[in-house]
Image (cartoon, helix red, strand yellow):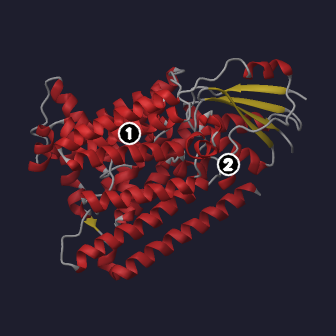
Amino acid sequence: MAEKIVDALGEACPVPLIKAQNAIKEMNVGDILILQIDHSCAMKNVPEWARKEGHNVEIEEVDDGEWEIIIEKVK
Amino acid sequence: MAEVSNTETTGSSIKRSLSSRRRSSRKPKKNMLPYGIGLLVVIVIIGLLLSTKSGLLGFFWLTGIGFGFILQKARFCFTASLRDPYLTGSTSLTRAVLIAFAVTSIGFTAIKYGAYIRGLPIPGQGYVVPISLATVIGAFMFGIGMVISGGCASGTLMRVGEGFFMQVLSLIFFIIGSLWGAHDFGWWKLHFMLKGKAIFLPDIFGWFGAIVVQLLFIAFLYILAEKWENRKQA
Amino acid sequence: MDIRKNEFYKKWFKNAWTYVVGAILLSVFQIITLAVTGNPWGVSGVLANWGAWLYQAVGGSVDKWYYFSSEGAQKTLEAGFWNHGGSMRNLGIIFGALLATLFASQFKIKKIKSKKQVLAAVLGGLLMGYGARIGFGCNIGALYSGIASLSLSGWVFALFLFLGAMVGSKLLVKFFM
């Protein structure tokens, strides 16, 4: 069960989402992706995409205007 | 799309390693609400000052605040609505934009028709502009620009307010580009715009027909967007 | 009592609204704007005026430019920034967004990370600025307000905006990330 941290801080849409999609593609089932973002729009479109794909998603506000999206690859 | 809104900070059920977990509980979060209230006071004062000059000026200021607040809170992004169907396969924003088009069309048509039957000049006809090669090229350039800079006109302003330095830079060059475009405007007008024709849908379909055609077309696009999203998913 | 735990606060000021709520509220503001000012919402035309004022500030003159030659345009330029409704509205959008982020305790300065971002912002800004002038507006004036005004130009703009966005996406993935 590997864990991968992807830094998308300071990146505007759609870069965080594309980074997440690319990272997930190379991961195994059960692996966890931690995507660091500070773009408020990515906080909406990344979880929306991940949930639709069927992955487990959690969002944590780690600082003012800074979030970590934790995605567990399910399939 | 509705369920996304109230899940911003969820409890944790995904197990993650302690080393990465520790980072997330590092410092207590600041409460920025006092700054927000301070800014609100400044906004009200500016609004009052503008209103003493002219009520309309105060109105413009107030609606600007409203537009900015709504765009930010809803993360409403015209760029994403046009980009995501192709890039990521998501159409939830596209469908929201279509809803905005439909609702605003109804309101606008009511206002315009109201003026028309009372024999008053129809407001907002300055936005019914000729269609020419300049429209095509302009829209195409704008489409490329908004995707690579990560924000359209309203989106760029909104993100300046959110604290994006990159968008401050693109706003500066948006202004420079506008000046450049204004400088060349005469040439485009002479060669293309004058040959174009402005088409106001009620002139073709009648008032009632125009709004029906418009709403049916929007509904068609909405269904298309929904189908597209599900197709991509499968 | 901690307001941050208040349900009303959380719902309206802390968490994001749904896209549909945004769509409806924007529509309401659009309709009020047309009713009160006699014109729909526009953003980018104002930015051309900002350009002209800045150009004048550094000693340039736009008086001979066709775009600014009409009496109305000249009057607007003479009256200045603080008497221009559209400018106040654009400034308001920036302040409104800032207000929303502060109320949610989510403000953060996001610095530029790479040279690629600089290039993307400069090129993107120039393309949008120029494109909006010759296309009679931006995603707001030409697209949203154009379509809602029952103008066919809005739909033509939408089609080519979409095609531009496709090309932009390709460029973005290839060169800017």
Quadrant location, the N terminus of chain B: bottom right
Question: What residue is disc 2 on?
Answer: B4
* Residue type marked 2: Val
Residue C154 percent across, percent down from the top left: 38, 61
Position above or below: C16 against C22: above
Crowd around label 1: few <14 · some 14–19 · many ≥20 (10 Å): many
Whether residues under marks 2 and 1 lie with C-beta atoms below 8 angstroms apart, the answer is no
Query: Residues at marks 2 and 1, common chain?
Result: no
Image-based side of B190 in relation to B176, left or right: left
Q: What's the distance in space between the residues labelled 2 and 1, CA to CA? A: 33 Å
Q: Residue at x 47, y 40 (%)?
A: B151
Residue C163 percent across, percent down from the top left: 49, 52
Residue C127, labelled with which disc?
A: 1
Image-based side of C107 in relation to B139, left or right: right
Residue C64 percent across, percent down from the top left: 9, 39
Image-based side of A66 in relation to B189, left or right: right
Quadrant location, the C terminus of chain B: bottom right
Image quarter of residue B106: bottom left
Q: Is residue B25 visible?
A: yes
Report helix, strand or loop for mark 1.
helix
Position above or below: B114 against C21: below
Q: Is residue B130 visible?
A: no
Report helix, strand or loop for mark 2.
helix
* Residue type marked 1: Leu
